[in-house]
Image: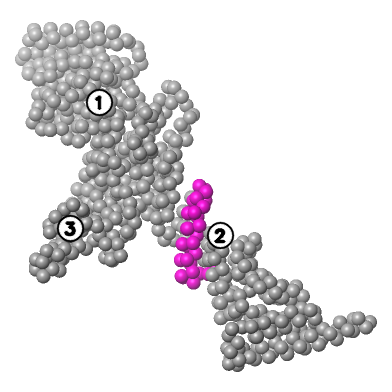
Amino acid sequence: VPLMDTVPPQVVPGVDPSARQLCFAWGPAEVLVCETLFGRTGGSRSRCLSRSPSPSRFWGEGREGTAARALTGSVAGTGEGAPTSSRVFVVRRDQDIYIQTLRKLFNESHGIFMGLQRSEEELAGKSRKAQLVQVSKNYRSVIRACMEDMHQAAVSTRDPALQGQYSTQVSILSAMELIWNLCEILFVEAAAAGPLLLRLLDWVRLHVCDVDSMVREVLSSESPSKHKLFWNVVDIFVLQGRMDEARHLLSKEASANPTSMNMYKILDDLMKKMPVPSLGNTQTLTELELKWQHWHEECQRYLQDGTFASNSHMESICKILLGDEDAILEKKELMTTWYHFLVTRLLYSHPTVKPLELRFYAQSSMDLFLGGESSPEPLDMILMAAFEFEMHQVIKECSIVLSNWWFVAHLTDLLDHCKLLQSHNLYFGSNMREFLLLEYASGLFSHHSLWQLGVDYFDHCPEYGRVYLELHIERIPLSTEQKALKVLRICEQRQMHEQVRSICKIMAMKALRNNRLGSALSWSIRAKDAAFATLISDRFLKDYCERGYFSDLDLIDNLGPSMLLSDRLTFLGKYREFHRLYGEKRFPEAARLLLTLMTAHIAPCSFWMTLLTDALPLLEQKEVIFSAEQTYELMRCLEDLTAGNPEKQKFQDDDVETTKVEMLRLALARNLARVIVKEGTVEGS
């Protein structure tokens, strides 16, 4: 890549010029950054690479976590002292779009996005809500499928660097699905008290603690109840509210240890009778609270009576059923996260929690779980913002933390369709949905094939989408004619006339450089560029003079009304028509057309001799073709060419041209004599 001599790198202003500092150069989809280099003289030298000097926005408002990939190289200084080295960094707008395994995420989510835009006005009320929930689940299924593909890629590769990259992407996708699922529960579905807890339990079971492998290990052992992980599995089932599975495992303990049969039956009965909310609205919240209170008192009574005192594991489970926070926190290592602790705490202490109460329990649960030992991570802050119903904060934090715009763009679009972001406009005129979609689509346009998806996203940004599309589509490299036609079709469908002309001119110039005159003429006609069509027509005529025949006859023969774009193109089309008439032996018509081309002054002066030479065979025909008047016109044209031509001396010095002129004069005189005799004979008769 050449050094940027014409557009020098810019240096960060306001810093000490004698100190090492950053310089940078902008490109359409990336920025290159390097350090300035110094020798002992203190003079700085900087070398910075760039693929294009065109300025471009790289980060959205407040976005600090843009995806970046550093390509490191050694750059040596050349001062008087010893050379120093520096690294050149390529900072890309959205590095994730270049990851092959994420193509499924971008392609399939595009179809979901387009379906959502088309169905906006089709349904209302509960049907619309169900449709939006289904759209959300479709997005999550794409994330999960992509995550599974990435996991398989990590397992199958032997390259440690690739394995690390894939594992990182699996973690990012897992976090994305975790956040999206919670937003789906709280914002899209807007689950009410009762069903809310069931949704949160499903959320925890799906994302937080996968115990399947641990369960298989325990159940496949000879004596499951004696396995070292037996009680851990039971505890996890209880912590996640999976009572049937916990009871099934406890039955194995009862079978293996008859002395604990009585305790097992009591605990099994308590777990069986535990009241839980239902999705079918078969009971009111008041009924649920009364049942839960009676059940809670029964658990308290058994614990106080010391029923489970001889078995610490069962006693611990009973304390968890009572919602004892200390007992639940003792299982911190099994829960691993504060939000698992939150859901377990709600299950056994506040099963009828209302959505707006979540923020208080969430904050206290995080404080209790972390206990001052560690500070919250970015994912924790995003989830906390969701529990606090701060949708805009969720979007902002995700924009900072996640490595691309895909997540926030699609989530915001979905929330906007849920009518949850209608009142939030940005200070520069566009709303949040449109801003994020514009950023995401702009990133897609830096990819050699994903740019086609970006077109549809721009189409659904009513305020600035058209402007962005016009700017980005001009930057697409037209590497092949097929790609150019694809871009052209997109522009024509949207009546982007300036871009259509620009694309056609570019392709016409490329074809002309490669001496593909037919393609160049076709593109110039499509661009309605009269000047360029004239230039190419001249090239056709020049080639004809050199070779004696036309190339691309199919195109010239079928110009139709397009030949009216310029006089020269008209001449080219008509001159080709003259050759066709001559070939069909329609000599009178050919003669009239040839004379018209001479007298209409649309032929270039340099081509007149060729036209007059073309008249020679017609003048020498046995049958008289040109009338006396037409012959006089041809004579006048010949005299104008020889007498009025500024290159008259050339005709005198060039033997070939002189011979042609003499032959023409002789043929014209002979034809005139034949015409006079013929016309006199006709009049005399």
C-alpha span from label 2 to label 3: 48 Å
Name the element at disc 2: loop
Q: Would you identify the image quadrant in which residue 322 lies?
A: top left
Tag 1 near tag 3, CB within 8 Å = no
Magenta-highlighted residues: 491-518
Name the element at disc 1: helix
Crowd band around label 3 with a 10 angstrom C-alpha radius: few (<14), some (14–19), many (20+): many
Q: Amino acid at mark 1?
A: Phe
Tag 2 near tag 1, CB within 8 Å = no
**In the rendered image, which residue does mark 1 sit on?**
387
Residue 427: tell me if it is visible.
yes
Front residue of 38 and 112? 38
**In the rendered image, which residue does mark 2 sit on?**
528
Residue 138 lies, with reference to residue 313, above or below; the image says below
Does 12 sit left or right of 564 as displayed?
A: left
Name the element at disc 3: strand
Front tag of 1 and 3: 3
